Image (cartoon, helix red, strand yellow):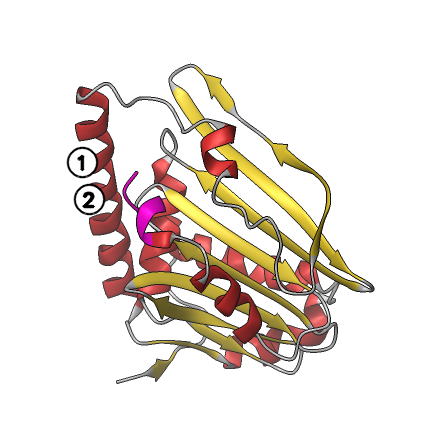
Amino acid sequence: MTSTTTFPIKMSKYIFLILLILSYLLMACDIPIEESEEETLETIETSEDFQALEEKIEEEEHSIEEKRTERNQEGDTIALSSQTLENYLPKKIDKYNPSGQVVGSPYQASGTSFASVEQNYNAGNNQLRITVTDYNGINTQHAQSIAMWKSGLRIDNRRELAGSFEMDKMIGWEIYHKKEKKAEIMLAVSDRILISAIANNQNNTDYLKSILQKINLKDLAKF
C-alpha cells in the first residue's frame, strides 16, 4: 500500500541521501527552494516507510559487498576496461548518429576502481547521451541507489516526475523534466553495472527505455 510522507522525520544517513536526491531535482531545474519546497515535499511517495527503507538499504549494501568480496577473492579487483564497456554503446540509434568520440573515464587508486564511458548522439536539434559505468570498486553508493529505487520512491510536481521502474527484472530510476521536456533514466544492470540515458525533446521516458531494451543487457549483467 502506498503511503505519502512529509518531513520533518528522524534523520539518518540514508534519509539524508533522499534529501540529496530532492536537492538534485531542484538544482537541475534551477528552482528556488523557497518557491517549491512545500510542493515537492507534499508529493513524495514511497511504498515503504522510511525505517523499512533504511533497513533495505543496509541489506542491499551488505549483499553487494558480499558479491564484491567474492569477486576480489577470485582476483576480480578492478573495473572493466573502457574498451569492454564501449562495446555496449550503440553505434547508431534510429535517427541519431554519434557525435564526437566515445569519452572514457577509468579510475584506479588506493584500492578503488571504477570506469565509465559515454557517447553523445545528435539528430538535428535532438540530443541524446548514453553512459555505461562499472562501480566494481565503489559499490556503496550504487547499493544505496538500488535500495531506494526498490522502495518505490516517487516524486511528482509541476516541474518533474521521478520514480523507479523495472526492465527485464532490473531496477531503474527515471526523471522527466516537464518544462524542459528532458528525459533521464538510470538502470542498475547488476550489482556493479549502471547504464544511463538522457535526451531532450521528449514527451516522457518511453523512448529512452526502448533504446536500452535494444542493448544486450543480459550479457552486460554477467559481469
Q: Are marks 1 and 2 in contact (CB under 8 Å)?
A: yes
| Residue sitting at x 45%, y 69% | 8
Residue 66 disc label: 1
**Quadrant (top left, top right, bottom left, bottom right) of the C terminus:** top left
- Residue 17, compared with residue 79, is above or below; it is below
Residue 113 at what x, y percent from top left? 42, 24
Q: Which of 147 and 31 is in front in this view?
A: 147
Q: Is residue 31 left or right of 59 when viewed as pictured?
A: right
Q: Is residue 219 magenta?
A: yes
Q: Which of 97 and 79 is in front in this view?
A: 97
State the image quarter where residue 69 is shown.
Answer: top left
Q: Residue pushed farthest right?
A: 125
Q: What's the distance in space between the residues labelled 1 and 2, CA to CA?
A: 5 Å
Give the residue drawn at x 30%, y 76%: 47
Residue 32 located within the stretch drawn in magenta: no
Q: Could you tell me which secondary element the residue under label 1 belongs to?
A: helix
- Position of 65 relative to 43 (above/below): above
Amino acid type shown at disc 2: Ser
Residue of label 2 = 63
In magenta, the rendered stretch is 218-223
Residue 10 appears at what percent x and percent y?
A: 36, 61
In this picture, residue 53 sits left or right of residue 160: left
Residue type for callout 1: Glu
Image location (x, y in percent) of residue 110: 42, 14
Q: Is mark 2 on a helix, strand or loop?
A: helix
